[in-house]
Image: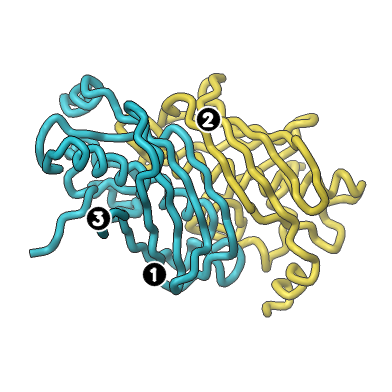
Chain colours: A cyan, B yellow
Amino acid sequence: MTQKSFQDYYPDAMAHCYGCGTLNEHGHQIKSYWDGEESICHFQPRPYHIAVPGYVYGGLLAALIDCHGSGTAAAAAYRTAQRAMDTEPAFRFLTASLRVDYLKPTPLGMQLEIRGKVKEVKGRKVLIEEWILANGITTVRGEVVAVQVPVEMVEALLKGN
Amino acid sequence: MTQKSFQDYYPDAMAHCYGCGTLNEHGHQIKSYWDGEESICHFQPRPYHIAVPGYVYGGLLAALIDCHGSGTAAAAAYRTAQRAMDTEPAFRFLTASLRVDYLKPTPLGMQLEIRGKVKEVKGRKVLIEEWILANGITTVRGEVVAVQVPVEMVEALLKGN
């Protein structure tokens, strides 16, 4: 049995995101999991996700931080509520603010590891700290403030309104 | 005669970026221009650049802020040096740090306007303030710290090293 990722639990009506939606055939379809207290995601950039020859384009790295962060926030909300991720109402988070520090160029041509950690929960806001590793070396640090989507809005989306 | 964009002046060896490289056939190929003291870029997200139905995916917005910011930094460096953008050595900037605040959801299905302004120049670092408008309403604010790529590195890239 293969472990389901956080994104595999998103309801279909909320699974269109270019970064993390399982239904977006053009998108990145990232998959995030728990690894103890941290969340983890692996992603192999395509050859055309280039900045300058040999290195990954920063916009992709920002997108990975963004979607892995909002996924981690949702998973953390289920953990805090001691609920399984397939129970309703669905917890979904949107990114309110994103910060990315490019510490060094990220080499292209290898699988990257994106890691996340819940730093703070303040009401409906969750602060996620993240970092990206290439070959075991941290090349990017990021921070996401994710905000829980109100249940009524989730329900409206589920109804297609 | 059509006005050339900042990105049209990037040397071929540095024109591969997924966000702004004119030679990246898979990429966004954004085009930035001066509009008085501000820089401007128009971009029409594709239908699959979706977050939840009706709205643009945040990772794309971060990428637009990123590449329009580094392009604006390069153009500003030429302006400060009172040099035309087709003169050598080429000024190129990479993003050291990126901050994006999603003020409200950005509607999908229309052309977006990305605006930038040089806020501070500190040695090789340029701080660019940016914002994205949809239908005249600011939905995103961003900040990019761009760092000038050392001339030797630009030359090495031009030589294909």
* C-alpha distance separating marks 3 and 2: 31 Å
Circle 1 SS class? loop
Q: Is residue A113 left or right of residue A37?
A: right
The reply to whether label 1 and label 2 mark residues of one chain is no
* Residue at x-position 27% and y-position 46%: A21
Q: Chain of mark 2?
A: B
* C-alpha distance separating marks 3 and 1: 18 Å
Amino acid type at circle 1 is: Gln
Residue bearing mark 1:
A111
Q: Residue furthest left?
A: A1
Looking at this view, is A3 or B6 the one in front? A3
- Residue B90: name its quadrant: bottom right
* Residue at x-position 79% and y-position 57%: B91
Q: Chain of mark 3?
A: A
- Mark with earlier residue (3, 1): 3
- Residue A45: name its quadrant: bottom left
> Can you give x and y, in whole percent of width and height, for residue A62 in the image?
48, 49
Q: Is residue B36 left or right of residue B41?
A: right
Residue bearing mark 2:
B140
- How packed mark 1 is, by other alpha carbons closer than 10 Å (few <14, some 14-19, many 20 or more), is some
Circle 3 SS class? strand
- How packed mark 3 is, by other alpha carbons closer than 10 Å (few <14, some 14-19, many 20 or more), is some
The reply to whether label 3 and label 2 mark residues of one chain is no
User: Quick one: quadrant of the N terminus of chain B?
Assistant: top right
Q: Residue furthest bottom?
A: B161
Q: Is residue B76 above or below residue A93?
A: below
> Can you give x and y, in whole percent of width and height, for residue A8 in the image?
18, 49
Q: Chain of mark 1?
A: A
Residue bearing mark 3:
A34
